[in-house]
Image (cartoon, helix red, strand yellow):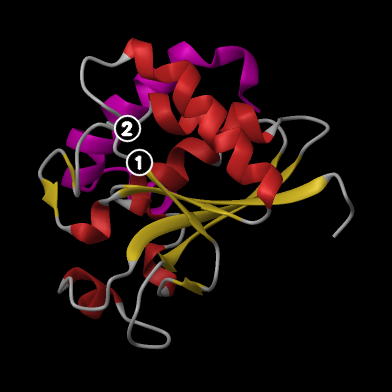
Amino acid sequence: MGENIQIATLGSGCFWCTQAVFQELKGVITVVSGYAGGNTTEKPTYKEVCSGLTGHAEVVQITFDATIISYQDILTIFFTTHDPTSLNRQGADVGTQYRSIIFYHDNNQKEIAKKVIEKLQPYFKTPIVTSIEVYTTFYEAEPYHQNYFKNNPNEQYCNFVINPKISKFRKMYAEKLK
């Protein structure tokens, strides 16, 4: 990878929602749904992660061109498209697998994450509980989880949960869309 091509690994609840948001941004090359942050089970399955026993979070791994979109912009969008003040839950999705988390790939990403939280905290009524942890391993989710929103636009979860989130996101970040 060239120095301008970077990776962000983020968890903000259901990875179907997060992937749908980041796929629409200029400068984003790929967004892959998967699992990270676990303490057991190599190559965990969706069923294992949903049990809460593996310790993994549902995450997306975003490959992006930093000359087009910065890591700081990625994180700002991350914080404004989910509830970072909700511990181990996003809406009706409850469990540690839905926690708000940033896995940093180097110390620069770690410092940027801290600064973005500090800058955005005043806009939230309660404390941001997003954890910042060192990146270790990413496991790609099963194929049917990839591009879920694009492949299943009429599915009930997509209509009731993802569509409203995407509509709000498109209004907020129209200038950053592909």
Residue on which the image places disc 2: 82
In the rendered structure, the answer to whether residue 6 lies left or right of residue 145 reads right
| Amino acid type at image mark 1 | Thr
Residue at left offset 44%, top offset 12%: 171
The correct choice, above or below, for 10 with respect to 91 in the image is below
Residue on which the image places disc 1: 130
Q: Position of residue 172 (x, y in %)?
A: 46, 13
Q: Secondary structure at mark 2?
A: loop
> Dot 1 surroundings within 10 Å: few (below 14), some, or many (20 or more)?
many
Residue at left offset 53%, top offset 73%: 137
Task: For residue 64, say whether it is visible.
Answer: yes
The answer for how far apart the CA atoms under marks 2 and 1 are is: 11 Å
Q: Position of residue 40 (x, y in %)?
A: 32, 84
- Please tell me how many numbered marks the rendered image carries: 2
Residue at left offset 85%, top offset 60%: 1
In the rendered structure, the answer to whether residue 53 lies left or right of residue 172 reads left
Q: Range of the magenta residues?
A: 149-178
In front: mark 2 or mark 1? Answer: 1
Q: Position of residue 108 (x, y in %)?
A: 70, 43
